[in-house]
Image (tube, rainbow, N blue to C red):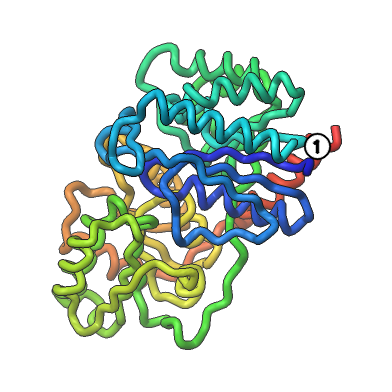
Amino acid sequence: MAGVFIYVQHLLGSGHLHRMARIAHELARTGVPVTLCSGGMPVRALRLPASVRFVQLEPLHCAPDDFTRLLDSRDQDLDGKLRGQRLAQLFAALADSAPRVALIESFPFARRQMRFELKPLLKRLRELSIPTVCSIRDILQVKSKAGRELETLALLTDYFAAVLVHGDRRVVELQATFKHAAQIACDVHYTGYVAGPAAVSSSDEGGAAEIVVSAGGGAVGYPLFRAALDACRAGCQADKRWRFLLGGGLDAEQGERLRADAPANARITPVSESFTRLLQSCSLSISQAGYNTVVDVLQAGCRGLLVPYAQSGEMEQTLRTQRLQEMGLIGGYTCQPLSAARLAVRVDELIAQPVASADPPLNLHGARNTVALLQTLMCS
């Protein structure tokens, strides 16, 4: 079964996995066999075509405040036994799929904590003469330790045929968050943003009088939900319905507190596949600034207010918000800490403004362009 072998490890949210799933969908649509190996916690909402072979490795995740400490499904520290199990699973999946090309998400730009299995995997791929491609989002977490970027360059030279940047360079260049970008030895391609299939709204799924509040998987979304709900309770846009979409990663007790405090014009539901349809007809989307959510808002062409997650030194969402706000495409709220009153002011300001758009439009064809680049490698 010669095709594409994809490795992805999500640690906190599930955005990395969902982005790779979108690429897997497009590969399957064009008839390319796909094996998708996921090393994070299982995601119930993940939807894949039947033709995609999905391999769930023994899952690992991390705490929101410590990305260096890997935990298993029982929240126990990663040990040597589990390392061996995962590596055996990876090698077995690779042997079964016999791919023509491999796609490694994030590494070596990120996921250094997965070196214990990725270095052996990359060596095996090189031994088998399988071209390997690195897949990264539009914005990287800037390295704080000297030498990390040079280490990344060395790994790219040794193991990778290309780097795929899933973004539009008009928004941000790789150089902005990886200062040695010009020294990358392999080819670097900007694919455009990886959007899902365009959705069409349904008359019973909300409308122009609705404000949609979301936080992706929800693991760190409670402060946003709390501030938005308090703004709603205080009368902000009282003539509109507010819909809160709670991700599966949100703490159950926090979800119950939100439901208990919800006023009559607030509807609190789990995130569902209708998210993109809701965006098509909403009055405003309020969300964190994770990659997939931002792409969905851009694709829908609705008004957007981004409230970036910026804890634990994370700057990715803040930079994405700043860039898109500078381009006039999306509104931003970057005041810390979150204030319901200030958030309400931004909501009122944005709803009074017309919907903005880029000219020419941003490149949202990242899945299609990624598949074309992978097919070129498969045929070489």
Question: What kind of residue is marked 1?
Answer: Met
Q: Report the residue that reaches farthest toward the bottom.
A: 203
14 vs 233, left or right, is right
41 vs 166, left or right, is left
Q: Is residue 345 above or below residue 73?
A: below
Residue at position x 61%, y 45% in the image: 36
Looking at the image, can residue 216 be seen?
Answer: yes
Residue behind mark 1: 378
Crowd around label 1: few <14 · some 14–19 · many ≥20 (10 Å): some
Residue 248's spot in the image, x, y percent?
A: 35, 60
Q: Quadrant of residue 157?
A: top right
Q: Report the residue that reaches farthest toward the right.
A: 379
Q: Is residue 180 above or below residue 343?
A: above
Q: Is residue 190 above or below residue 327?
A: above
Residue at position x 54%, y 26% in the image: 118
Residue nearest the viewer, comparing 27 with 55: 55
Q: Specify the quadrant that holds the N terminus.
A: top right
Residue nearest the viewer, comparing 329 with 336: 336
Residue at position x 41%, y 32% in the image: 141
Looking at the image, can residue 344 be seen?
Answer: no
Residue at position x 35%, y 69% in the image: 270
Q: Is residue 233 above or below residue 52?
A: below
